[in-house]
């Protein structure tokens, strides 16, 4: 039996989270003695997915699905993914499709999974709960839809030989329940915050929006996305799309640099999955230092431009 996985892509390029979900599917398939079938919307290259363990790639090509809509995507996936385990990344798209897909397929839904299952029969796995403050182990019998927490499991190469097919589906325009009428860019981020390997984030310690130039300069030299604490977004210094934490985006980059952020528990809830945390704060007692891998005690207005200059020299 195949294990199905939604290999999410954007403009023909696989998202990191999509490749991570395929890697997760391969590890699960190895445990259960199954194979991995990856499902792709559009025409992204199949051979890239063979590299991560998908031995079959089903491509869904239908003009109705050119724009994302949870209901029509879930319907297409439900028609194609004829197996007991369907895996999705917990991206905006994956997390929106998953409950609809679980409903349509009569499956149980397990979200925010970050580790390989400890057993596949019954399916037993740990998932993050309580905004990342707790780990819950669940055991599920029957069909299951799983979402993989972004940047938690990692992308793991496992080359197999594979085949590709175009899947036939019956989705029509009447299945599209939400149509996007217009899109306004809410953030200056050129890099998707949730996909970014490096994030430079700043808080109330920056004193005002006019001071964000040094944050953007540091982000630019590192090729990083920018983020902020909640109060900064609440007062309009930065767009809400950049707000990370319990009530904002949950991110898990390889490197998170927190500047002038105190490290409240609600902020940590969204960033404590980061691989390495660097904190820059002028208060040696700032709680964030307890969660930091590296800490710099100093004035951001002094430290950040120096750091940017040194990085520029290093890169040069
Ligand atoms: C239900 C609920 C949900 C919440 N959700 C979120 C959330 O999702 N995300 C979030 O971020 N917050 C959230 N909060 C708010 C959270 O509790 C904190 O109030 C908030 O994170 C603090 O933001 P801050 O660190 O930017 O500001 P502050 O707490 O004011 O900290 C500013 C920091 O900057 C430092 N600083 C000052 N000047 C400088 C300088 N010149 N150089 C270097 N450092 C300097 C200070 O020492 C201080 O540590 C939530 C709160 C509640 C009650």
Image (cartoon, rainbow, N blue to C red):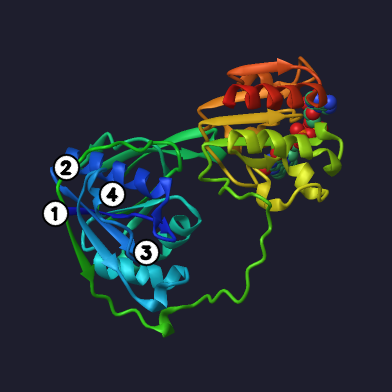
Foreground tag (1 vs 4): 4
* Residue shown at the point (18%, 39%) measured from the top left: 30
Marks 1 and 3 in Cβ contact (< 8 Å): no
Q: Which residue is mark 2?
A: 32
- Crowding at dot 4, Cα within 10 Å, few <14 / some 14-19 / many 20+, comes out as some
| 10 Å crowding of disc 2: few (<14), some (14-19), many (20+) | some
Q: Which residue carries the number 3 mark?
A: 101
Residue 107, placed above or below residue 68: above
Q: Of marks 1 and 4, which one's residue comes earlier in the chain?
A: 1
219 to the left or right of 54: right
Judge from the rendering whether residue 75 lies leftward or rightward of residue 291; answer left or right. Answer: left
Distance from disc 1 to disc 2, alpha carbons, whole Å, reads 9 Å
- Residue located beneath label 4 in the image: 48
Disc 2 versus disc 4: nearer the observer: 4
Residue closest to the eye, 250 or 42? 42
- Of 173 and 269, nearer the camera is 173
């Amino acid at each position: 039996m195949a294990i199905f996985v939604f290999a999410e892509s954007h403009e023909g390029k696989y998202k990191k989270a999509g490749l991570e979900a395929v890697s997760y599917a391969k590890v699960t398939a190895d445990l259960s003695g199954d194979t991995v079938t990856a499902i792709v919307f559009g025409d992204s290259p199949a051979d890239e997915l063979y590299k991560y363990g998908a031995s079959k790639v089903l491509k869904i090509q239908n003009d109705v699905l050119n724009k994302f809509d949870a209901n029509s995507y879930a319907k297409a996936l439900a028609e194609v993914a004829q197996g007991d385990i369907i895996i999705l990344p917990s991206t905006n798209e994956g997390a929106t499709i998953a409950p609809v897909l679980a409903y349509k397929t009569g499956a149980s839904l397990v979200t925010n999974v970050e580790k390989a299952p400890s057993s596949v029969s019954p399916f037993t796995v740990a998932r993050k709960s309580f905004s990342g403050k707790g780990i819950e182990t669940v055991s599920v019998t029957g069909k299951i839809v799983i979402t993989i927490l972004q940047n938690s499991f990692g992308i793991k190469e496992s080359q197999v030989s594979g085949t590709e097919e175009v899947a036939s589906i019956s989705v029509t325009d009447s299945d599209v329940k939400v149509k996007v009428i217009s899109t306004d860019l809410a953030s200056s981020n050129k890099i998707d915050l949730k996909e970014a390997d490096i994030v430079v984030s700043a808080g109330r310690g920056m004193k005002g929006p006019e001071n964000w130039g040094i944050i953007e300069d540091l982000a630019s030299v590192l090729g990083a996305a920018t983020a902020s604490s909640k109060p900064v977004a609440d007062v309009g210094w930065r767009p809400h799309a950049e707000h990370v934490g319990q009530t904002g985006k949950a991110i898990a980059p390889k490197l998170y640099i927190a500047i002038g952020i105190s490290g409240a528990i609600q902020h940590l809830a969204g960033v404590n999955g980061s691989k390495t945390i660097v904190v820059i704060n002028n208060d040696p007692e700032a709680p964030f230092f307890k969660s930091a891998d590296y800490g710099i005690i100093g004035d951001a207005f002094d430290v950040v431009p120096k750091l940017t200059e040194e990085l520029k020299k290093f890169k040069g």
